[in-house]
Amino acid sequence: MRQVPLFIGGEFTPSQSEHWIDVTNPANNEVIAQVPSATEAEMTQAIDAAAEAFKSWKEVPVSERARLMLRYQALLKGHHDELGEILSQETGKTFEDAKGDVWRGIEVVEHAANVASLMMGETVENVGRGIDTYSYIQPLGVCAGITPFNFPAMIPLWMFPMAIACGNTFVLKPSEQDPLTPTRLAELFVEAGAPKGVLQVVHGGKDQVDRLLSDPAIKAISFVGSVPVGRYIYETGTRNMKRVQSFAGAKNHMVVMPDADKDQVINALVGASVGAAGQRCMAISVAVFVGEAQQWIPELKEAMSKVRPGCWNDKEASYGPVISAKAKARIEQLIARGEEQGAKLELDGRGCQVEGMPNGNWVGPTLFSGVKADMDIYKEEIFGPVLNCMEAENLEQAIALINANPYGNGCSIFTNSGGAARRFQHEIEVGQVGINIPIPVPLPFFSFTGWKGSFYGDQHAYGKQAVRFYTETKTVTSRWFSSEPVTGPNFSINLK
Ligand code: NAD
């Protein structure tokens, strides 16, 4: 059985742990590898290696750090198919979707290669007579990242390339459910020329995360995952005086105005709700039909009923299995609860089978109509291929519904009215808004800006905000004496 190594101080080493976790292929639940829960001593080694490497890495010129990212980006592109295949096998994603996961990470590495211009400070000459003020952006030290199962390439790549390009060193703790992709990312980082100790990859679960949260050497923690863990990470990390950015769960709505293009709406809803088996933090899980647009639900049902899951290399499959048998059971329980609580189950994805793969975690496309805000299927993040349809009399009601929801990751409106779109983008209390775009994930020169219960912290992932998150600003006020007459002591706070 393949045992996933730790990556510490530039070496891939087998763990001495007595606790190993099975990594399964979600399409058949066969065990494909085992991942260790790193021991206390291994966690210490990883953090110490990062702290030691920081002493020299922070002195490496910014253009050299940028060149490492350029080489890394080229290698990731060169290994795009291979990474997609590894990722497909441990997540169940279709090959095309797995390559998309890798690609959106590559884009962040490209952005990290621009680090010199992103790290420029500010200057003002003559803030006082003969006195100048300027600021430098400096790295923090050792940073750590804790990532979820659903994007094992993109989300680690949101974190360590930006942090390392800024001059920090990094300890990554990827999801124990799909550690093979992050391991390959680390191997390629070495091949790109990353010095020893700049990146470590450790494995495990809560104990290992708690170690990162409590170690004083770690200055900043980036987390992406579910709401309860996200809150815990934010509360614990900040209590331990760390800088924390914590991206959590979501419930994303798409408002459908009656003047929208019906075919575009239906395609967008099908792809954005069941794509990646609904396991995207930006998946559309609620469609809000305004007025007469609700008449399109039968056509939506018809379109969704034609979609089917399948194995990663099945070119006809629209999406893959959900990550685990446990996740499947939870989704099926929520579907049952939706029915019990009075929603109309238009399409039932329970009991879905895929030919030749009887043990996979399959869930078929599932559609509810008549969903109300007090039902569990609305209140909880289902994280499966399930779409809830709700109704609103007008745009105002639709906006009020979304603004009352505790999450604020993404939302979208489909309309042909500029006025409706403008009102929606202005009034909606959600951090990422799509106009006739169902999944508005910003490219890395912007930031990934979830709001409310979908994000705890101040500075978001990638873009300029990531540079702020992973750095400190130092402001220097300077005067060089030339031929000024010497005056007496200055007893005021003013610069003279
Ligand atoms: P998860 O919270 O179960 O796990 C995330 C990470 O936290 C993993 O590395 C895991 O090992 C660790 N972890 C789990 N339990 C822990 C605990 N008790 N204490 C400390 N660490 C713990 O999340 P998941 O199921 O892997 O990922 C899916 C979730 O991630 C969904 O809720 C999804 O919305 C969210 N997500 C959010 C975003 C975003 O940008 N907002 C992006 C992707 C995923």
Image (cartoon, helix red, strand yellow):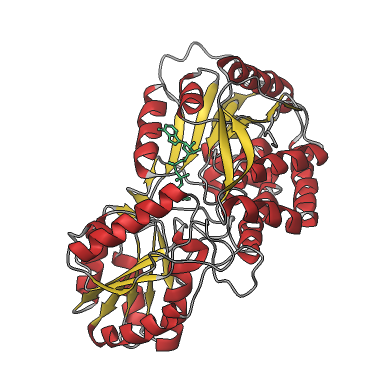
Q: Residue at x 40, y 40 (%)?
A: 457
Q: Quadrant of residue 427?
A: bottom left
* Point 57% across, 54% down: residue: 28
Would residue 207 be found to the left or right of residue 202 on screen?
A: left
Camera-nearest residue between 22 and 487: 22
Percent x, y of residue 80: 74, 57
- Dividing the image into four quarters, tell me where ligand 1 lies: top left
Q: Is residue 466 visible?
A: yes
Quarter occupied by residue 338 = bottom left
Tell me if 13 is positioned left or right of 489 in this view.
right
Residues 475 and 93: in front is: 93
Residue 162 vertical placement versus 310 (above, below):
above
Q: Position of residue 309 (x, y in %)?
A: 52, 68
Q: Residue at x 22, y 84 (%)?
A: 291
Please tell me which residue is depicted at 17% across the width and 62% down the height of the picture. 341
Q: Is 374 positioned to the left or the right of 127 in the image?
A: left
Q: Is residue 344 above or below residue 148?
A: below
- Relative to 491, is 26 on the left or the right? right
* Front one among 442 and 58: 442
Q: Position of residue 370 (x, y in %)?
A: 21, 73
Q: Is residue 250 visible?
A: no
Count of numbered circles in the view? 0
